[in-house]
Image: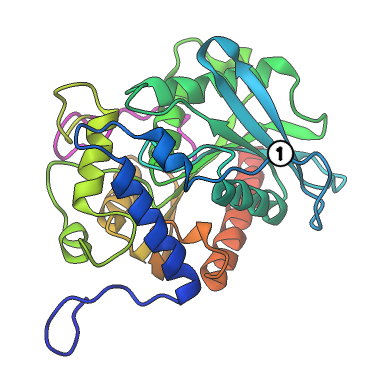
Amino acid sequence: MADEHGGRRRVALPWAVRIPLCLLEAAIDASQRRDGSVNRSLFALFDRCAAANPRPDAAGVSSRDVTVDVSRGLRARVFTPPVEGRPLPVIVYFHGGGFSMFSAASRPFDAHCRNLCGGAGAVVVSVDYRLAPEHRFPAAYDDGEAVLRYLGASGLLPDEVDLSACFLAGDSAGGNIAHHVAQRWTASTAPPSENPVHLAGVILLEPFFGGEERTSAERALDGVAPVVNIRRSDRWWKAFLPEGADRNHPAVHVTGDAGPEPELTEAFPPAMVVVGGHDPLQDWGRRYACMLEQKGKAVRVVELPEAIHAFYLFPELAGDNRKLVDEIRAFVEESIIKGQVVH
């Protein structure tokens, strides 16, 4: 991004977006320590939470909080749309935040999941996974699997929900979690035949992948695009990864060109990958999609040329948000139809 004098300039955004973005970046930088730890009391001053609301809103969406596992403090927020006389798919959602920030109750994620629930016509289970660095790799992946087991055994969801049409979704770090949970679930030696949850698809919104290499987009957009930069990303990875691991760890580098080839079974589901044109992570998202294609997996790449990282948390960016929800709904419906044909 260069101006007429050849200097770099920040991505142009409306003030209704730029002001909260500046506050978010300030909160991240003030609370994120060099060693990867987080000053949670300080970050909580910015991270305002929304209460679950069992009363349907204007779109008919209601929400409630459930405890999945008391021993590990694992919870989830369940959003339910109006029943339309058809089986409802379920989207298990993992929020972003560098593995170390935010929760399912954070207001932007509560609103995002509520919008996704109503727009996609699906029950959304937003996972309140444990955060790093108090809970490093693989805690978030373990929590994702635990939620899938719980859904299949608890009778938590309404009778109208079709657990054979389950989608894993997430943004940024949550997209990373969604991929790894899908990989684990479909590779399990204890077949999920004992569990009615069947993965029909994965939906990754600007997923947080990476490596020791700095990609062209990471270099070009560093300090120019909001939210994600090299310094913050490195600290998030330091907080999440095992002590001493570098960014070519399999949790980070999933494309196989700097480490072991990722093993995906035949049961790994179709994927939808959303790529933002102003997102420093865009090259990793495209590489991930290419890796899936090379392994014979069905993948749909949705390119949003003007999208910044975390655009879905800002309702003012209405055009990209409408397109996102429309694309997710279409992907869910098509994946269900194709899955029915296969079965």
Which residue is identified by label 1?
Answer: 52
Residue 252, how many percent across, how many down?
26, 36
Q: Of the residues shown, which amino acid type is indicated by label 1?
A: Ala
Q: How many marks?
A: 1
For the magenta stretch, what is the residue range?
Answer: 250-270
Magenta stretch containing residue 233, yes or no? no
Q: Residue lying at the far bottom in this picture: please name it.
A: 4
Q: Residue lying at the far right in this picture: please name it.
A: 85
Q: Helix, strand, or loop for circle 1?
A: loop
Q: Going 80% across and 52% down the picture, which residue do you hit?
A: 57
Residue 204, how many percent across, how many down?
45, 47
Can residue 266 be spotted in the picture? no
Left or right? Give the position of 55 relative to 326.
right
Residue 276, how many percent across, how many down?
38, 63
Residue 35, how many percent across, how many down?
20, 31
**Placement of the C terminus among the 4 image quadrants:** top right
Q: Going 52% across and 62% down the picture, which residue do you hit?
A: 314
Left or right? Give the position of 102 relative to 280.
right
Q: Going 23% across and 22% down the picture, which residue do you hit?
A: 242
Task: Tell me the quarter of the picture where residue 7 sits.
Answer: bottom left
Vertical order, 220 against 166 (above or below): below
Dot 1 surroundings within 10 Å: few (below 14), some, or many (20 or more)?
some
Q: Closest to the observer: 268 or 223?
A: 223
Secondary structure that dominates the magenta span: loop
Left or right? Give the position of 61 relative to 32.
right
Vertical order, 166 against 107 (above or below): above
Q: Going 24% across and 67% down the picture, which residue do you hit?
A: 224
